[in-house]
Amino acid sequence: MSTASPSTTLPQELALITSVLELMKQEQQLLVSADTAGLAELTPRKAQVVVDITALAQQRYQRLAAAGFAADDSGMQTWVDSHAEALPGWQALLDVTREAKELNRINGMLINKQLSHTQSLINAMRTPTSGGEAAVYGPRGQATPTGPSKRYVVG
């Protein structure tokens, strides 16, 4: 009984990582245009593709372990070193994965920039414009009273 080759999943993995890369490019455009509705629609699609990629990678790792190699990317590289026919597929997967990681890093920076900008706006709404005025919004996003309190103190 022969076991499947660790390289069997490479074409599917490459197709999926390429799909994620395209989704991340769309995500970047949505981030730049601050299209939250588009992001809300795209994010679950991207997450599902990542789940599918992970499942395929786990299959590859199981096949590597069954072949006596480390069940990780270094084990795959060692296996590929002795199976030259798998090198183009493995190299293509690594190349597209590197590109996706870089795009993910850039998108993360865009997200952080948007979060920082949003936090600055929130802080500006909470901060009084002069020393004697109360903040416009409280910590829960509710308007805070600016006049004297209407509570009576019973003593």
Image (cartoon, helix red, strand yellow):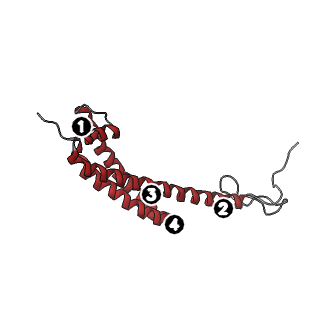
Residue 67: which quarter of the image? Answer: top left
Who's the residue at 38% across and 60% down the image? 23
**Relative horizontal placement of residue 14, taking residue 125 as reference (left or right):** left
Residue most toward the left?
A: 1
Q: Residue 26 location in percent, x, y?
A: 41, 64
Query: Are the residues flagged by discs 1 and 4 in contact, CB closer than 8 Å?
Result: no
Instruction: Look at mark 1 in the image and give the residue it sits on.
Output: 63
Who's the residue at 68% across and 52% down the image? 139
Residue 83: which quarter of the image? Answer: top left
**Nearest to N terminus: mark 1 or mark 3:** 1
Q: Residues within 10 Å of mark 4 (few under 14, many from 20)?
A: few
**Which amino acid type corresponds to the residue marked 4 in the rendered image?**
Val
Q: Residues within 10 Å of mark 1 (few under 14, many from 20)?
A: many
The mark closer to the camera, 1 or 2, is 1
Query: Tag on residue 32?
Result: 4
Query: Tag on residue 121?
Result: 2
**Relative horizontal placement of residue 1, taking residue 25 as reference (left or right):** left
**Which amino acid type corresponds to the residue marked 3 in the rendered image?**
Leu
Instruction: Look at mark 3 in the image and give the residue it sits on.
Output: 103
> What kind of element bears circle 4?
helix
Q: Residues within 10 Å of mark 3 (few under 14, many from 20)?
A: some
